[in-house]
Structures are given as structure tokens and as C-alpha cells.
Amino acid sequence: MKRVKSKEAMSIPLGTPIFARKDFMRKSLVIALAASVTATANAQISSKQIAGQLNTITTMVPFLTISPDSRSAGMGDAGVALFSPDANSISWNMANMVNAEKKTGFSLSYAPWLRQLVDDVGFSYLSGYTKLSDNSAVAGAIRYFSLGNINFTDINGDPTGNFNPNEFSIEGGYSTRFSKSFSMGVNLRFIYSNIAGNRVLNGISMKPGYSGAGDVNLLYKTKLKIAGKQDDFNFGVNIQNMGAKMTYTTKDSRDFIPTNLKIGIGLKHEIDQYNKLNTYLDVNKLLVPTRPVYFQSYKGGDSTDGSGKKVISNGMDPNGVSVVQGMVQSFYDAPGGFKEELNEWNISYGMEYWYMNQFAGRLGVFYESNKKGGRQYLTFGLGFKYQKMALDAAMLVPFFKNHPLQNQLRFSLLFDLGSLKDE
């Protein structure tokens, strides 16, 4: 069972069983509309026309792509090159953890998810770190996504039980500084997804899915002279979720997890001793194959050849492709050519204003092409530090009305464990 992104289902973990529950029926409608659009590919249209069609990239466990903390969520989901990294930086760029101002800390974040559709879906994130020295640090994190309670029915609509689908990942990371300017980090992650339990649905035996993945990330920091002042500049790269494919059924139907390439820059400008402004820009691309366009009619018949295999009109075959090959292929396999490849890059832009390093105001924008899911929204955030703790909050405002994530809220609470221990 694959998970589908669509313009109206931003980061919704689809592929979830949808049976008797009314609120989940709205999701099924979105999936059906997205599938109907992408299934109408005409074998005779040009690459330019194909690039103008909806062709979202599908992966398993999309909850791994949700921004876990409120600070980055308030800045358009930008976070690869943050200044003053905290416990949540393990999910953005572990290489940046050696630059944390505090020795030890942890953070707890929560977001009530999809409140426009349901009232019992939530995303939780717990993270912590400690600096082993000025040049090395370790960190760990747990993310948990609960999809609420779902009532199962048979083909006749009779109840067959209920289930609470859930997904989680557990990860650990290590970072080291090679020089004053350059640091590197690695993460290892275990992923578990249970969307239907151990049962038979429509004649298919279901089971929980699991996988292992890793991240490799880099950070380069320097100074830039702008308008006569020395401003701090960060450049970060993070390749996330490089790992084995997953399945909920048999080993023959494994699908890619959301391997990501994140590239970001950050600029910190100190206006005076009380005021400073941080600006961030991230670009992100899924490193998984793009679905090709198949012939509707091949040699006067259906869309298959003599062996029953679908024949590709434009693009490349994603079946049987290894994880590494899929990562490489993702840069040139779009059926719409170079124009469609450009559409597969998402942009995050954010600004963060600090007053006396205690009060923060944040603003951001996230943009994804309408042809690749259409997630486009503004974000707002506030931050407050008091002695050994900090509180961050963020709100998401989509560009489209009646959006499932309209006014989505997130909260993060951070603690400085080092100060508490000293005290």
C-alpha cells in the first residue's frame, strides 16, 4: 500500500486503511482524485505537456518528512543551517550540534494533526543531546505519529473490529568538528509503521512495516562582510533517510522510504547588542524515482506488452531499482524532462528576529509545485526563553481555503539540562 501526496492532503500519511470512518472518507476522495488525474496520461502528448500534469512522488512513511519542531515550522520548514542549534537540530543537521550553545538539553514537541478533518491524530517528537567536548556531540530522538482510532468493516459494511494505526522512528546521531569552520554528522534510524495490524484486508495479508535508515550531513560556517559589518554565514547539506525499502504485505512489493536531499544557507545579522535578524533559505528534493507515464494503448491493444508488463511512454521504470540507483535516477527520470525535474525541488524561506536573546518572532513561506503536491503556505512563530527553558509555538496558514492543515498549530518545550545539573 503506497502513500500518496496531493495538493489537498499535505503530509497526510495516506495508505491508511479507510473503512467506516466518515472523517477518513474525505482523504479517500483526495486520493481518488489524484489517482484519476495521473492515470489519464496520453501516450502521444509531448514532454512539455507531461510536465504540466499532476505527478506526485509516492513514498512509504511520509511522517518522516514532517517538520518536528516549532522553531523551524515557524520559518517555512527551514532548518539545515540554523544558528544557535538546539536539541531539535538532530532532525535538521546533526553536524550543527557541535555548535550548540548549551552543553546538554532536550526538547518535547507536539502538533495536533489535521484538526480540520479529525480530532484524534497527533504528532509527537522527543529529542535530546549532550556535547562530549567542544568538537563532538551525540544526540537521540523519537518521533511518534498516531492516526487515531479506525473502525474496520467487511465488504458488506459489518464491523470487524477497530485499530489504532501508529508509526514511530528511533534515531541516534554523532557529530564532530574537523576545523573551526567545518563539521560533519551521521544519524542511524529505526522506522516502524503499523497501519492495519496483522489482519487480512481484501484478501491481502497485512503486517507492520519496518526499515533502517541513515543520514549524512555537513555544515560549513564563516564570516561575510556586508555593509561594513561581519555577519555569520552557515551552509548546510543533509541527505536523510537513506535506507531499505518497506512493505506492509510481501517482500515482492517493497516501496521507497522518503530519502531527502536538503541544502540550506543561513545569514545572521546583528543590528545592535539587543537586536539580531537571522535569515534562512532551504531547498529540498526527494531522492526517489518519479512515476513514469505508460502507454494507454500499446500496438493497438491495452497498455501492456505480450507478457503483461506495462510499457513506458515517457520516463524510467522504478520497479526493481535499488535504493542507491533510485537516488541517482531521481535527478533525471521525470517523464516531463528538465521542466518537471525543476518542479521536484521545494523551497523554504524563513526569518527569525531576536530581542535580547529572549524573545523571538518568526515568519516563513514554503513552496511546492502544484504538479508535485501543491503544498504552499505561510508560517508564523513565536519564541520565548526564560532561564533554563524555552517555549516555541508556530502556526501554518495555507494559501488555499478549506485546507486540511488550516491554522495548524505546533508547540515545543526546551530545557537546558546542563544548567539544572550545575544548580
Image (cartoon, helix red, strand yellow):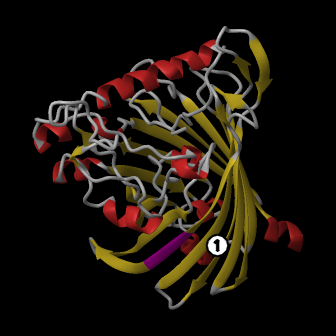
Q: Is residue 389 something one can see in this rendering?
A: yes
Q: Which residue is mark 1?
A: 101
Horizontal side of residue 387 vs 382, given as left or right? right
Using the image as rendered, state which of residue 279 and residue 193 is in the foreground: 193
Q: Residue at x 25, y 27 (%)?
A: 40
Identify the residue at horizontal 25%, vertical 41% (top origin).
293
> Which residues fall within the magenta stretch?
215-220
- Residue lying farthest to the front in this orientation: 306
Q: How many marks?
A: 1
Q: Main secondary structure of the magenta part?
A: strand
Residue 232 belongs to magenta span: no
Q: Write down the quadrant of residue 151 in the picture.
A: top right
Q: Looking at the image, is 228 positioned above or below residue 335?
A: below
Where residue 88 appears, as percent x and y from the top left, is 63, 59
Closer to the camera in the image, 18 or 107? 18
> How far across and how far down the image is residue 18, in percent?
61, 22
89 left or right of 302? Answer: right
- Name the amino acid, label 1: Glu
In the image, is 53 to the left or to the right of 379?
Answer: left
- Give whichever of 374, 158 is nearer the camera: 158
Of the 4 image quadrants, the one containing the N terminus is top right
Relative image position of residue 218 (x, y in whole percent): 48, 76
Residue 413 seen by the camera: no
- Does the magenta portion include 218? yes
- Looking at this view, is 338 or 106 the one in front? 338
Q: Quadrant of the C terminus?
A: bottom right
Q: Is residue 313 above or below residue 276?
A: above
Question: Badge 1, how many Cα within 10 Å: few under 14, some, many 20+?
Answer: few
